[in-house]
Amino acid sequence: MKIFKKKLIVLIVITSVLQSCSDYLDQTNPNEASTDTYWSNFEQSDASLTGVYGAMLDTFITNTWSEAIRSDLGIVSALRTNNPNARVVPYYSHTYNSGSFNFDRQWNAFYQVIFRANQLITGLEDMDDTLKSDGRWTEQMGQARLLRGMCHFYLHALYNNGEIIIRDKVPATTEEISKPTSTSAEVITFFRSDLKYAYDNLPHAFEEKSRVDKGVAATILGTSHLYEEEYDQAIDYFNDVINNGAYGYALLTGEDVKLMYTSAGEFSSESIFEINYSVALKVEESQWYEESFNHRNARYSAPNGRGGGGPEHTVVSAWLTEAYSTESLDPLDARNTVIGYNGRDRVADNISLRASSMVALVNDEHTEYYQSPTAAIRESFNRQKISFFKQHTNHDITDREHNVGGTPWKSGKNVIINRLADVYLMRAECNLETGNITDALSDINTIRARWGLALLGPVVDASKTYIVNDPVTNSPYTDENTLRYQLRHVERPLELNVQGISVRNIDLRRWGNAQARFAELAEIKYYLDNYTYTSNTSGGTKKRNNSLLTRTVTSKELYSTGKNEFEDAAQNYNETRDYLPIPLSETDNNTSI
């Protein structure tokens, strides 16, 4: 069991999902106690702050399965065998609408956090001057405003062209509940004000790693400037995060890279913000209770034999599987020459350390998987499920998800929202877009080097292997367009995978090439081949039929329907899909929209 790091206990009773409607006026809110009594000390206000963090436990905050299949990263596994559930297909095919299945859940989850943050902010503002002069007041206010600003930031990045509702106080009247949307510029000004307050007033780090701090504020502020193509301002924040030792951030390197997305790697030096879960708390609570200390992401991404399943079951897209399988390794890195279970090294098998950390591949015979020596021994990889996401599964601590929380629906694995590698890659993008190719390559190569990958561009370090030109186009990586494609469609998706809150969808949207990306991928046809793997220590072998992805024509196509991947997405995606629409639950109940 992982080390318990002061897990949050939700102390405030409140409706689990915020309904943006007149429900507020239909019943007494149990949290609206008199501020004269409730806010008389910091223990009471800290209990309210705990309630704000409690709302962040909602599985729909990250909404991982739907955001993965809405992007180019994931596929509903049943699509490949032609029997997907109709309620989830619209996300993959981009035919969803404002009333689609579970469409309102992420919207409501964000506004629930905002609602609770506003309760805390109101209570803190009503405290007397003596309490306001205490450093604890500033720390609690900074965290509340950071969480409120963060949620407005993500709502702005995801919905309605950035024109969302600014909720800056607890609604007390029908008019305050039925607020109109604000312009994108107004929303940006609002959430940056919250984030800047947090950046100016919070410490660089809290002892409790699950709390948001100055580093989180800096990361999101920098990201917000990047999203608006304000590269100079973004670089300032990214430089602070990367170079300021007061934060304590450092990339995982050497053998420690194997801790990525494992229980032992939670709250690592690379983590900036992660949501803290545990199956040891409130074990009686249902997996459907969104403030329980567990989430359902493992159920949606683990192999079927390990507890994965359901209509939302999501597997790695073919192009991403291929990209992980074809990364160029550095043979000069000693980690790549360690002999695997099959008697070969990573260079011979072309299995990178990054691939081993991010996905389960049938031909990865260098990494344990669900307490078996290799993924091929543990899993059949049948029914055209050729790889699995590792990020949200408990593949490192158990042989099946049922053993973690008593049901595969309950996982206590932390969910990372922000980590340092992303900041490096965002800074690389800023440098690239301002013409600084040298520094962009430096940041990209810093990330590649820690995984033992060959570096890109001109030789800088003779102890490393470099690839000067793109192997497909033969263009040099010092070419702006070549490096831009590499960053967008190799480095960022392979490094981040399904981490965070809809990062890939936001990236594709802000770059303006989502439709082109889907069209590009729809042109690639994939097939399946058999894979012979080492089955025991004596060198015996067995075969996993139709488990190895290839572009070479075989008798088995990846899709039983004969379709290429993302055909539907390429056909249906247009600029109206760049943002999600405001959910029907909001427009039905908000008379100002």
Image (cartoon, grey):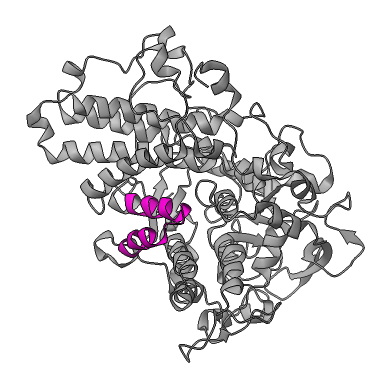
| Nearer-the-camera pick, 380 or 336 | 336
Residue under the image location 71 percent in, 66 percent down: 322
Task: Name the chief secondary structure element in magenta.
Answer: helix
Note whether residue 581 is visible: yes
User: Horizontal and vertical percent for residue 513?
Assistant: 64, 55
Q: Is residue 459 left or right of residue 552?
A: left
Residue at 33%, 24% in the rendered image:
12
Give the quadrant of residue 537: bottom right
Residue 258 at x, y percent in the picture: 49, 66
Please provide percent x and percent y for residue 512: 61, 53
Left/right of residue 248 with respect to residue 438 in the rendered view = left
Q: Is residue 228 magenta?
A: yes
Instruction: Based on the picture, tell me whether residue 359 belongs to the magenta stretch.
Output: no
- The stretch in magenta equals 217-240
**Residue sitting nearer the eye, 552 or 221:** 221
Front one among 156 and 466? 156
Q: In which image quadrant can residue 153 be found?
A: top left
